[in-house]
Amino acid sequence: MTTLSDAVANARKSGDYQSVIDSIPYMRFLGLTLQTHADGPICHMPGSEHITGNPILPAIHGGVVGAFLESTAIMHLIWAHESRHVPKIINLTVEYLRSARVIDTYAQAVITKHGRRIANMRIEAWQGDRARPVAAAHAHFLLPSEDA
Amino acid sequence: MEPDPERQKIEALLREKARTATGQTRALGFEFVSAHPRGAVIRLPWREDLVGNPETRVLHGGVITTLVDSVCGWSLFSALGGEADIATLDLRIDYLHPAEPDRDVFARGEVYKMTRSIAFLRAVAYQDEDEPIANCVATFMVGANTPKLQARGAAQ
């Protein structure tokens, strides 16, 4: 397996950030993939039995939705050259807007405020119709000072 | 202290629920530890494939989010006296301290206020009781999907 720092260095040259995801065990566990766009990566999480929280509806586990939003923010910060490492998360607030069905889910992040040490992020997840998000979050990350 | 039969009943029910769990609860290997009148304790045994930072082997924050969201759900089941139709409305988590590799993580949740349709919860994740790794507050809706499920039942 490629190390994370190799993967980040290669991605900066090639623009292919999938190998970064693949070097992070839990992102691989969720089966995340990503597509880069001019305004940042869009992450994808496939629907599967093992991410289900409510088997009756069925719906994706609320914690997994939070984990997906956090992972999308991390990938955005690495893509935006804010960090060569996995940036440290300070906190995350998730609003659950609609029940997330166990199907393909997408998410994209934006940096709403970029301070010297802190990045304030907003992340949204949707299924099918981007105008009807299933969840949204805001989060704070600590930026590594040596990696500006 | 006399064993509380009501609590024993809830503990048996939640233990059985953990044993037969499907989906993410089973995929992450959550274990039921104990139930309290308005709360519960669960455990995540250490797993290498849940690491979020391969350089430090610290668990991914999302795993901790799932752990505290789950313990909030279990705490609510405990407070309601059994499994119920619940949904997370919102959840805030503060990451206080990175989880140490190779060690289990526990989470303890508590319903601190309950209304007819909304439950207010707090939860903490820890490896050592006196050094929390994350603190969480969450609100849940009770009976969130009941109209949808009733409609589905009526249609069948």
Image (cartoon, rainbow, N blue to C red):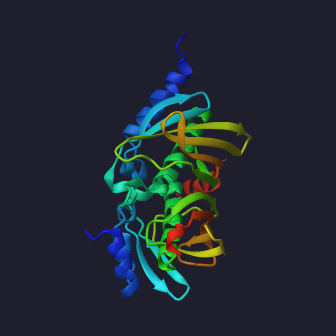
Q: Nearer the viewer, residue A104 or A115?
A: A115
Q: Residue most toward the front?
A: A146
List x then y, in percent, for residue A79: 48, 79
**Which quarter of the picture shows residue A93?**
bottom right
Q: Nearer the viewer, residue A91 or B17?
A: A91
Q: Residue most toward the top?
A: B1
Identify the residue at horizontal 38%, vertical 50% (top origin). B28
**Which quarter of the picture shows residue A24?**
bottom left
Which quadrant: the N terminus of chain A? bottom left
List x then y, in percent, for residue B77: 56, 38
Name the side, left or right, on which B13 lies relative to B112: left
Identify the residue at horizontal 55%, vertical 54% (top origin). B153
**Which quarter of the picture shows residue B108?**
top right
Q: Residue most toward the right?
A: B115
Name the side, left or right, on which B48 lies relative to A55: left
Identify the residue at horizontal 53%, vertical 77% (top origin). A128
Q: How many marks?
A: 0
List x then y, in percent, for residue A10: 34, 81
Identify the residue at horizontal 56%, vertical 48% (top origin). B96
Q: Is residue A144 above or below residue B16?
A: below
Q: Is residue A87 in view from this perspective?
A: yes
Q: Nearer the viewer, residue A102 or A82?
A: A82
Q: Nearer the viewer, residue A26 or A10?
A: A10
List x then y, in percent, for residue B146: 62, 51
Q: Is residue B134 above or below residue A47?
A: above
